[in-house]
Image (cartoon, rainbow, N blue to C red):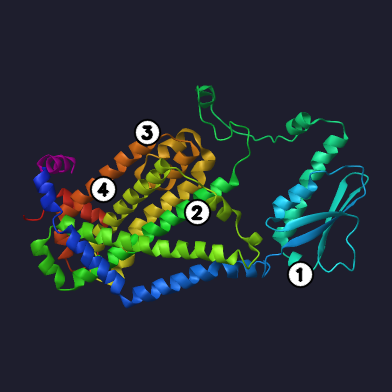
Amino acid sequence: MRFLWKRWVKRMTLSKIKEQFEGTGQVFRFTFLQLIKSRSTIVTLLITLLFALAALPVMTLVNGGSSSVKQSVAVYLDNRTPIELPELESRLKEALAPTDVTLLSGPLPKDEAEGVGLTLEENDDAFGLTVSWNGADFSDMSSVYAIGSAAYDCVNTGRLRHAGFGEKEIEFLQKGVVPDGLTYAEFSEPGADFPFSDGDDFDSSRYNLQIGYSVVIMMFCIYSVSYVVRAVIEEKQSKLVDLLMVSVKPAALLLGKVLAALCFVFLYMVLLFGGMLLSYAVSSRFLDLSAAPATIGTLLNMRPDAVSLAVIVVTGVLGCLAFGLLGGVCGAGCSSIDESSGAISTCLLLVMAGYMFSIFAPMIGGTLLRVACVFPVLSMFLAPLQFMDGSIGFGTVALSWVFQIAGIFFLVWLSARVYSSLIMYNGKRIGFGKILAMAGAGKEEKK
């Protein structure tokens, strides 16, 4: 098969390349219009939009969020210890933003309609910190946890200050200890990039963002493969394929379908996440979204530069294009919609493997992470955010593009050799292994 691949690349002059892909635009327009005009597609898009608009408000109310944003709250501090907490009010304002916080001294009055009470007392072997509240607006446990966490940090700082430590000593004593395991070669490597070399704790928000990005890429690939496989099988079952094979080359026929499916799925994802962002912007004016995941705020606060955006777009497009071509070739081996699950599962296994590895790779770090960012199936999940995080350089990203493009050329070569035979085939589904065997056996289309 390697000899056939080299011979095919050598014969592919610019004129022949243009001939191979002539008619791609016509196939793209036809397939895209068919997807857009489908009644089931319109219903799916409307359901998706309604789901995106309603998901965040419903999730907030179900999780105990308030039906309105509280403008201000009074926090009563009953401090029964000699510890001073001068920074408590500012920390509470940060924790409950955008709600304005007023810190008052004394216990929480029983007749107070709405309010929060903090009671700090010293026992024989520990300090006790109790959070109490009046009113249904403070029944959300995430708000209670935020208040208690802010007060806990202030108490720890106040204890050290009361013991006579200065600000520098307090900062030193409050530094955490993060264990890490390395081989001697990795430890002695000059300029080695260790996951916790800066002494900071593991950044859960960045890790959640990595998972969120991987989920988006996984959804994009799965939806693209599903629509490509369905389009190929539906065209195969119709009489239109006989006419198309006369005027359009197999590579152009498949590439047009893949590009149309990618554009449609991109429109679908824009509608989904655009609706969620619109819901967040509108709901934040009327609902207390403190129970919403913190990763949403991390995502909205990101300001990637032009290079980072280019890396995200190029890596994602190349990866999805490769999976779309793979799905098209596998789908051509099916004779009915009932067999489409087998074709989709081939791509789904690769997508899930890349997704699962992207969950654990950032925690491993080191050389394994850099190698994974180059591997074609894994690079689309890992490379963009690792580049934005500074874990890998642009050279590593460029090398991953080279491998992705090589994989795309291989799939184009494969489709040029076997797609015309597969699209005319009617019978039991042909697996991807047999498709590779067909290409290696030299069953090339007659030009």
The answer to whether mark 4 and mark 1 are in CB contact below 8 A is: no
Magenta part, dominant SS:
helix
**Res 22 → quadrant:** bottom left
**Spatial separation of the CA atoms under disc 4 and disc 1:** 57 Å
Provide the residue span drawn in magenta.
1-12
- Residue denoted by label 1: 136
- Residue denoted by label 3: 395
Q: What amino acid type is highlighted by mark number 4?
A: Ile
Residue 344 visible in the shown view: no
Q: What amino acid type is highlighted by mark number 3?
A: Gly
* Label 4 element class: helix
- Residue name at image x 26 percent, y 69 percent: 33
- Residue name at image x 93 percent, y 45 percent: 124
Quick one: label 1, few (<14), some, or many (20+) residues within 10 Å?
Answer: few
Q: What amino acid type is highlighted by mark number 2?
A: Gly
Which circle's residue, 4 or 3, is located before the other in the chain? 3
Question: Where's residue 228, x and y in %?
Answer: 28, 63
Which circle's residue, 2 or 4, is located before the other in the chain? 2
The answer to whether mark 4 and mark 3 are in CB contact below 8 A is: no
Quadrant including the N terminus: top left
**Spatial separation of the CA atoms under disc 1 and disc 3:** 55 Å
> Compared with residue 391, is residue 250 higher up or lower down, i.e. above or below?
below
Of circles 4 and 3, the one toward us is: 3
Q: What amino acid type is highlighted by mark number 1?
A: Ala
**Spatial separation of the CA atoms under disc 4 and disc 3:** 20 Å
- Residue denoted by label 2: 212
- Residue denoted by label 4: 408
The answer to whether mark 3 and mark 2 are in CB contact below 8 A is: no
